[in-house]
Amino acid sequence: MKKKFVLLWMILFLMTSVSYADSFKVVTLGADLTQEQQNTMLKEFGIEDGDGQIIYVTNEEERQYLKDIVSLSKIGNRSISCAYVKPLEEGLGIKVSIANLTWVTEEMIANSLTTAGIKDVEVKASAPFKVSGTAALTGIMKGFEKATGKELSQDAKNAANKEIITTGELGDQFGKDKAVDLMQQVKKEVISNNVKTPDDIRTIIQKVAKHNDVNLSEEQIQKIIDVMNQISKLDLNMKEISNQLKDIRGKLSQVISQNEEAKSLLAKILDMLQGIMNKIKNWI
């Protein structure tokens, strides 16, 4: 029995090893960076000679992915954003960190990656100086495909790009955190309840917006409907998405927990002060 158990463990280990044997780290660099800027980014990502593969993202590629989603003025004429992509073992989820990106956030990138069908990956998105980061997702998806040898669905990539841009535009008006929460909640309702029709999606958007005290214009509602309509056609599972975002949500839970602890401590202090005041009042 013991020998059978050891044999089974060895088989499982080898299967896991094979799953990740062909995966490797990939760095995508903006094709318009100078050599010095490229070296700076490689150093930031901890990449040395022969450690991972380097590929380039051109402005033409960025425009191809984003031309029907965001204005060309926001895309710009140069490819600057860079990304580090490292596949992780199954079940570890998505881990994202960013630097020098002024328009997109870690949460926006992570949410869009789940829409694109990306799982179990460590991502770093950055630039040698401050940029909007609209093209970061393009590099990440290209890097993931190269690192894993897995081609992502074009429909899923389009939906992911539209999701991150729409969230960013909402963030310009309502704040990034509120925009992320709104899109997350609508996305959860659409996927969990298998909602397909634009009218039903509209109802969900209006309900979530009201709950979050967000006043959306008809144009904004229509943009969200377009995103969710594309997402509804993808084979997405909300439980899998939640598992992939556990590290991202863990940070948020930690902040909430710390806030709750702070509130609890403050309440105890106020109770103590109130008790002292009552004693003084009674004594007087």
Image (cartoon, rainbow, N blue to C red):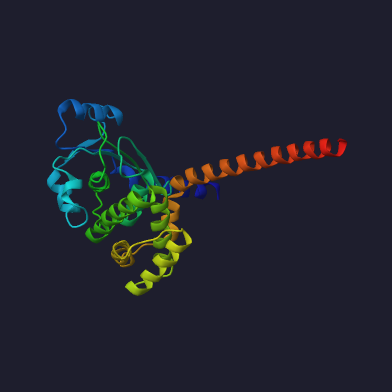
Residue closest to the eye, 121 or 37: 37
- Location of residue 138 in the rendering, given as x and y in whole percent from the top left corner: 23, 47
Image location of residue 225, percent across then percent down: 32, 66
Q: Position of residue 208 (x, y in %)?
A: 44, 63
Q: Quadrant of residue 234?
A: bottom left
Question: Which residue does the image show at 30% across and 52% down from the upper left?
Answer: 169
How many numbered markers are drawn?
Answer: 0
Q: Is residue 192 left or right of residue 114?
A: right
User: Which residue lies most toward the front here?
Assistant: 284
Tell me if residue 197 can be seen: no
Of 90 and 134, nearer the camera is: 134
Q: Residue furthest right?
A: 283
Instruction: For the C terminus, give its image quadrant.
Output: top right
The answer to whether residue 206 is left or right of residue 135 is right
Which residue occupies 81% across, 40% down?
A: 278
Q: Is residue 133 visible?
A: yes
**Where is residue 55, by image quadrant?**
top left
x%, y% of residue 22?
A: 28, 44
Please name whichever residue, 144 or 196, is drawn nearer the observer in this view of the structure: 196
Residue 131, by quadrant, is top left
Identity of the residue furthest to the top in this view: 36
